Amino acid sequence: MLQNMRNASQHWLGKIVMTIVFTLLIAGVAIFGVEEFFRGGSSTAVATVGRTPISAEAVRAAYQNQLQRYQQQLKRNLTPDQARALGLDRQVLSQLVTEASLDQKTHDLGLAVSDAAVLRAIHDEKSFQNAEGRFDPQLFYQTLQRAGLNEAMFVREQRAVIARLQLAEAVAADITVPLALREAVHRYSTERRAAAYLMLPASAAGEIPAPTDEELKSYYEGNAAAYRAPEYRGINLLVLDPDALAKPEEVGEDAVRKVYEGQKERFGAPERRTIQQIVFPDESAAEAARKQIEGGDKPFEAVAIERGTDAKDLSLGTLSKAELFDPAVADAAFALQQGAVSQPVKGRFGTVLLRVTAIEPATLKPFDEVAPEIRKQLALQRARDSIDTIHDAVEDQRASAKPLADIARERNLPLVSVAAVDSLGKDPQGRTVEGIPDADTTLAAAFRSEIGGDNEPLRTKTGGYVWYDVTRIDPAHDKPLAEVRDPVAAGWKSAETARRLAAKGKDLSERLDKGEAIDALAAEAGIAVQKAEDLARNQPKGDLTADIINRIFATNVDKAGSAASGDARAVYKVMAATMPAFVPGSQTDKAIEANFRTALSDDVLGEFIAEVQKSAGVSVNQTNFRRAIGGEY
């Protein structure tokens, strides 16, 4: 059953089951405690599906779990506003409502999961199995203890999970993909076309005179948005960065030397040895072989061959002591002289004889060589340790409404002052503004703020903080024609060129449809005819873009058309269309059927859950919802 659950996790239902249910269980227990999580507390429900409530504790736990996952992926903290902008609150509520819908329906249908099914599912779970693949009770209880659960709670939750999955499987199992759909997909994906075409360059539009004032004004008014000045903001940034705060020159030599002496393995390479090994069934056989080798009766390699060890498998490799898995073998190998054969060694996988054929001595970089690196690391660690103290001090000063510029000057912290920047990080001249830490996050926050706003500091990817103040706002506005006359003229010329090429392309394609030869039209235009074969939908080929190829597929065979291609325009005629025969039951057909069965199952499940919610009724208490996730809208 759990294997089915793992398979189901490939689509959204599995994510509901595995991501929401189990991780919600763990996260909720970790945050609120075992008894309170399962009891639901005394809080008013955030939402109800039929008679199934969704508690504030469940919403809060799921929201915090989702928030932590996003922050781990983004490698930075998210403010409440940023989390809401990403829609995390709506995602969590939607997922919990879906889960509650399944619970309500299983209850209405009287579905029950037997103890034997739950026990079998737990025994089949890989997380509770030992190295031999058998259920390990001790591992099971240890896992539950780490999650703060007891056996009864876990079994109860797993019973609910299995019931939800069984309901979903009953609804969407054995979905049949219609033959007509499979054949249509086959035709769409396997059809190939051939076309002959001309590529009209921009020069084919002819000489384009300068626009009149009226033409320029008309074009400008129709495309004013393209010449609109974006909103610019002036911002001050107080940057608290560990790298900037680090002062390697203040780290004393004693501290550096202490690290060097205590962590010498970091600054060199350990001794490595090339080791050979022969495995024997017991100690007496190994001792007899050792005597033959030392007595000169048989060389080491000959004994290995007698034991069925191939020459290329004789060596374990050139390894350090730590890289040897078996401690007994490691100790014996690193106690040998080069070329010597060991006494029989009782290892984990049998009794062995060892021989060391080469020794690479350990190396250690001198103190003076690594001291700057150690000093820099110590300084950076001290800076990171002091970050929170400085943060609290800055926050105290911010609470008294002190400007960032004054705080930066008093605390000798770097202040980044930006006179004007748009939301994309460009200045009014279109150049990228340098020096803004984590620019995407910082600019997004600054453009949501206002002058004099009380802004929370942003956490940087390096573990520091950025405080920001908006000092000026220049609203977005239309630039006057006089200010943008040259780019408007260039835009008009480009549009006029495209218009003329489109008219020429239409004329040529109409002549092709009337029966004129494409070679004759090409000679007339002074352009070479090109041919393309084996064209597939959505796949660019040569100088034909995916858009042009899709236009070719939308045109009947022996018909012509034209399409824009950057500054040029393609005029084409479809020469042929081929498609392999559709064979029901073929490997291609089976692949199509498998892909669309999943999609159809998802659609059916979605419709089923929507109908359950419609029949049972869903109510959401927005006030309790806002309280549960911690914030106001």
Image: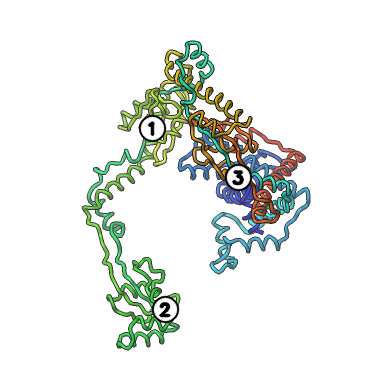
Q: Where, by quadrant of the figure, is residue 590 drawn?
A: bottom right
Q: Which of marks 3 and 2 is in front?
A: 3
Q: Which of 202 and 110 is in front in this view?
A: 202
Q: Name the residue under label 3.
A: 192
Residue located beneath label 2 in the image? 309
Q: Do the residues labelled 2 and 1 touch (CB within 8 Å)?
A: no
Q: Is residue 19 left or right of residue 470?
A: right
Amino acid found under the numbered disc labelled 3? Arg
> Which tag, 3 or 2, sits closer to the chain's start?
3
Query: Image check: 13 left or right of 297?
Result: right
In front here: 230 or 400?
230
Decide which of tag 2 and tag 1 comes sooner along the chain.
2
Contact between marks 3 and 2 (CB within 8 A): the answer is no
Q: Position of residue 290 (x, y in %)?
A: 35, 85
Q: What residue type is labelled 1?
A: Ile
In percent of width and height, residue 438 lies at 41, 36
Residue 227 visible? The answer is no
Placement of 297 over or under 129, stated as above or below: below
C-alpha span from label 3 to label 1: 51 Å
Q: Please rate how many residues cluster around mark 1, counting C-alpha atoms within 10 Å: few if below 14, some from 14 to 19, many from 20.
A: some
Residue 77 place in picture, x, y as percent: 47, 40
Q: What element carries label 1?
A: loop
Mark 2 burial class by Cα count in 10 Å: few <14, some 14-19, many 20+: some
The residues bearing labels 2 and 1 have C-alpha atoms spaced at a distance of: 63 Å
Picture layout, residue 224 above or below residue 364: above
Q: Earlier in the sequence, mark 3 or mark 1?
A: 3
Placement of the N terminus among the 4 image quadrants:
bottom right
Residue in view at x 63 percent, y 30 percent: 514
